């Protein structure tokens, strides 16, 4: 059985994902490094008490962002050989990021960072993702090779499906996500995933764009009145509407997490996961975060779980 101390130092939204991996509920979890990630980390840490722990943690984030902002990758042409060479160069830089080293150091099982390529608007973009696995980790080189192949072949859907399986998502939801292009011109895939919760969302208040400090329970009043709330069991996961498999897996994950953590914190974990989908669906377009719990989810789990609002 996993121990809470195994993930206590990780950002809480990631730590709770990682805990479900260590407990065997999911094969893996991941965190995408982006400008937004570093910005939210800094905003959350700057709001704390200025102790040595938070100062050190903030230094790690700032130093990492400075390096991140200077990263530049180029390659002569879009071929498998060139992209693999660029991947290796980029990986060497990413592994030296203090944030990557911090995340890996504070996870007890297999973790590594990989470059991530994608085609957007006719261009090849690059990023980075840190993976966290349990007892059945794939080789890092396999992930890179599949991503490179999908990018060269312009077959992003193939890599998305592979990545979904790495994260332990239900096959039906993977296919729902993969076939999202069928709805081009209609509502977005993310919006379709949220369809059952129209009555649970205070959309008027969300669209005001000034809700960063509001309790997420107020913004998503009635969220848990629907059993499908449990389908949002992972960050950046968009379940097929009404999916019983996702709901049942989410209920099992809820039970796992409440063995370790206060239930109010676990319920906020599901709400924040859902809230991320709201951002992606465009229901919220202004603030970087909505609901104070969204920003708090960037804090280390050991800090967040000790807050008085989450006392058992």
Image (cartoon, rainbow, N blue to C red):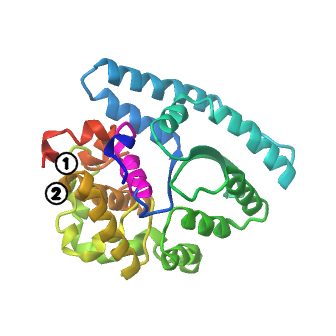
> As rendered, which of 295 and 309 lies closer to the eye?
309
- Residue 287 placed where, x, y %? 35, 46
From which residue to which does the magenta span run?
8-22
Tell whether 182 sits left or right of 248: right
- Residue 309 placed where, x, y %? 14, 45
**Observer able to see residue 243:** no
Q: Which image quadrant is residue 175 in?
A: bottom right
Residue at the spot x=19%, y=48% of the render? 214
Numbered tag placed on residue 214 in the rendering: 1
At mark 1, the secondary structure is loop
Q: Quadrant of the N terminus?
A: bottom left
Q: Residue furthest front?
A: 1
Numbered tag placed on residue 218 in the rendering: 2
- Between the residue at mark 1 and the residue at mark 2, the CA separation in whole angstroms equals 7 Å
- Residue 123 placed where, x, y %? 72, 53
> As rendered, which of 292 and 95 lies closer to the eye?
95
Residue 59 drawn above or below residue 83: above
At mark 2, the secondary structure is helix
287 in magenta: no
14 in magenta: yes
Graded by Cα atoms within 10 Å as few (under 14), some (14 to 19) or many (20 or more), the crowding at tag 2 reads: some
Q: Are marks 1 and 2 in contact (CB under 8 Å)?
A: yes
Tell whether 266 sits left or right of 101: left
Residue 225 drawn above or below residue 267: below
> As rendered, which of 47 and 184 lies closer to the eye?
47
Numbered tag placed on residue 299 in the rendering: none
Residue at the spot x=57%, y=80% of the render? 182
**Observer able to see residue 226:** yes
């Amino acid at each position: 059985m996993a121990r809470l101390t195994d993930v206590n130092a990780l950002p809480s939204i990631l730590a709770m994902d990682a805990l479900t991996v260590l407990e065997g509920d999911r094969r893996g979890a991941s965190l995408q490094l982006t400008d937004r990630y570093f910005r939210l980390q800094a905003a959350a840490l700057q709001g704390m008490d200025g102790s040595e722990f938070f100062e050190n943690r903030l230094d790690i984030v700032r130093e990492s962002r400075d390096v991140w902002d200077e990263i530049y990758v180029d390659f002569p042409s879009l071929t498998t050989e060139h992209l693999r060479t660029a991947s290796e160069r980029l990986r060497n830089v990413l592994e030296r990021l203090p944030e990557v080293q911090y995340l890996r150091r504070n996870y007890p099982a297999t973790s590594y960072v990989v470059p991530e390529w994608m085609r957007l608007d006719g261009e090849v973009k690059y990023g980075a993702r840190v993976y966290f696995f349990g007892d059945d980790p794939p080789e890092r080189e396999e992930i890179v090779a599949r991503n490179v192949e999908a990018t060269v072949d312009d077959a992003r859907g193939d890599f998305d499906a592979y990545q979904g399986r790495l994260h332990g998502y239900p096959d039906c939801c993977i296919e729902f996500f993969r076939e999202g292009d069928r709805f081009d011109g209609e509502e977005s895939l993310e919006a379709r995933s949220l369809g059952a919760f129209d009555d649970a969302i205070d959309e008027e208040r969300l669209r005001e764009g000034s809700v960063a400090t509001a309790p997420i329970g107020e913004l998503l009043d009635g969220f848990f009145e629907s059993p499908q709330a449990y389908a949002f069991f992972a960050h950046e996961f968009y379940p097929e509407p009404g999916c019983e498999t996702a709901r049942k897996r989410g209920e099992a994950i809820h039970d796992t997490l409440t063995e370790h953590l206060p239930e109010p914190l676990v319920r906020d974990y599901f709400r924040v996961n859902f809230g991320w989908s709201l951002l992606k669906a465009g229901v919220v377009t202004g603030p970087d975060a909505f609901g104070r719990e969204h920003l708090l989810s960037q804090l280390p789990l050991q800090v967040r779980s000790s807050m008085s609002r989450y006392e058992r």
